[in-house]
Image (cartoon, rainbow, N blue to C red):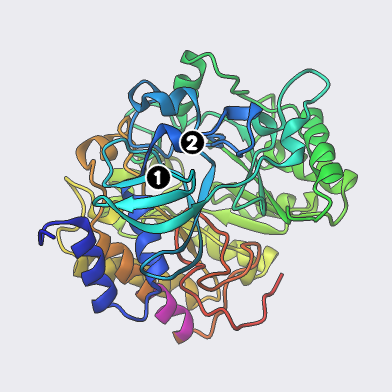
Amino acid sequence: MSSGSRTALVEDLMERFPHVPREAVFKEDLLRGGVAFDPSALSDNEGGEVKPKSYFIFSFDHGTLPELGEAALRRPPEEIILTGGPYELRRTVVSVRVNPSSPYRVAANEDGVLGLYLDGKRISDVGVPPMPEYYRHTLANGKSVMEVAPTIQWGYLIYLTAFRVCQYFGAKEECQYCDINHNWRQHKAAGRPYTGVKDVDEVLEALEIIDKYDTAKVSTAYTLTGGAITSKVQGLDEADFYGRYAKAIEEHFPGRWIGKVVAQALPKDDVQRFKDYGVQIYHPNYEVWDEYLFKMYCPGKERYVGRDEWHKRILDSADIFGARNVIPNFVAGVEMAEPFGFTTVDEAIDSTTEGLRFFMSHGITPRFTTWCPEPTTPLGKANPQGAPLEYHIRLLQAYRQTMEDFGLSSPPGYGPPGAGNAVFSVSSFMDSLPADEPVEI
């Protein structure tokens, strides 16, 4: 095996960071660099036995739809589960990010059993999510449940992208790593159904179907999200626009799901309205910690709110939701994106850890999404390889250590922690936390 192979890199990191679960090393590599799919591993879209990728907000792909080949026509699965193989992997749920040129490939062997291959060698078995019964039913107007209320994280989370575009628009306002607006355009161009503003009654109808057929109660939480609203949508500001969905859901299905909202860091009165509408968990994402990088990468957020005010609002929101229920996301990896990012892993980890310590010292536990360098974004275009795998592995180590320093446990609304248990699919932070703690909801 050549020393330059991806296998050698992965095995070296496993050896150097033995406290990070080996499952997380593979998961981070798949999330940051994507995976290729043999035609034998693609789904039959909504007519098949496998739950297809729903493109619930961003593309999370390393190519545009026209560049994905057959994977654009027959969608890959929403997620895959890795188990077994030579590394004896425990059950690991990974969000699918398609990259036809990835060294990782999902393919069926001669017996039709799916596996994950790296550098040509089978490294694990692959499980795919079965088509849920509720995806087989449509709304009265013919829309699919997958279009209105897709589920991710192996069915744990209903993802309600109420507003499919962002009012931070164009080069001077869009976050430089985000392809929400492009993803909207590419789905429309491909003739796929992709509803811009979801109707409250349609959302309720879709949830009724999920509630009826999800008899095992696998779906436990819903997330309300979408693009930032800087003016108004349908005459409503951001808190009332997203809040009205929570209000309707909580009135129709009291206590059925944990309600979460991903929105901007809003003033305290607006945050109070989210709480009054029935939201239980608030995600005012701070995206990247470093002051200069926030200005460069989130120009709209800097212009409309500003970094210091954004952080102040995050801390203020803990007065309303309780610190444990304020969980801001950051995009792990953009710290090292050219041309403005840190050039060493040490510097990037130091900066990000400073941010973790800032929030965790106030009892607020951030979470993160592993950056996918989507090609239609400025940072994705300039950094097709993403951040180094070592950054992601050391972040998991720093994250867990910082949580322990402040006596915090895994945040609510993410399912169980621990390698082999976690279902959160867009980073390994839950896989890397201790599994033996009591799960708090």
Between 124 and 397, the residue placed more toward the observer is 124
Q: Earlier in the sequence, mark 1 or mark 2?
A: 2
Alpha carbon distance from label 1 to label 2: 10 Å
- State which quarter of the image contains the N terminus: bottom left
Q: Which residue is mark 2?
A: 76
Percent across and percent down for residue 157 are 66, 51
Tag 1–tag 2 contact (CB < 8 Å):
yes
Q: Is residue 264 left or right of residue 249?
A: left
Q: Nearer the viewer, residue 313 or 350?
A: 350
- Tell whether position 1 is magenta: no
- Residue found 61% across the figure and 83% down from its top: 437
Dot 1: element: strand
Q: Which residue is mark 1?
A: 106
Residue nearer the viewer, 248 or 123: 123
Left or right: 329, with 343 as reference point: right
Residue 232, can we see it?
A: no
Magenta-highlighted residues:
398-404
Dot 1, crowdedness within 10 Å: few (<14), some or many (≥20)?
many
| Residue located at (79% from left, 18% from top) | 141
Would you call the spot at circle 2 few (<14 residues within 10 Å), some (14-19), or many (20 or more)? many
- Observer-nearest of 416 and 102: 102
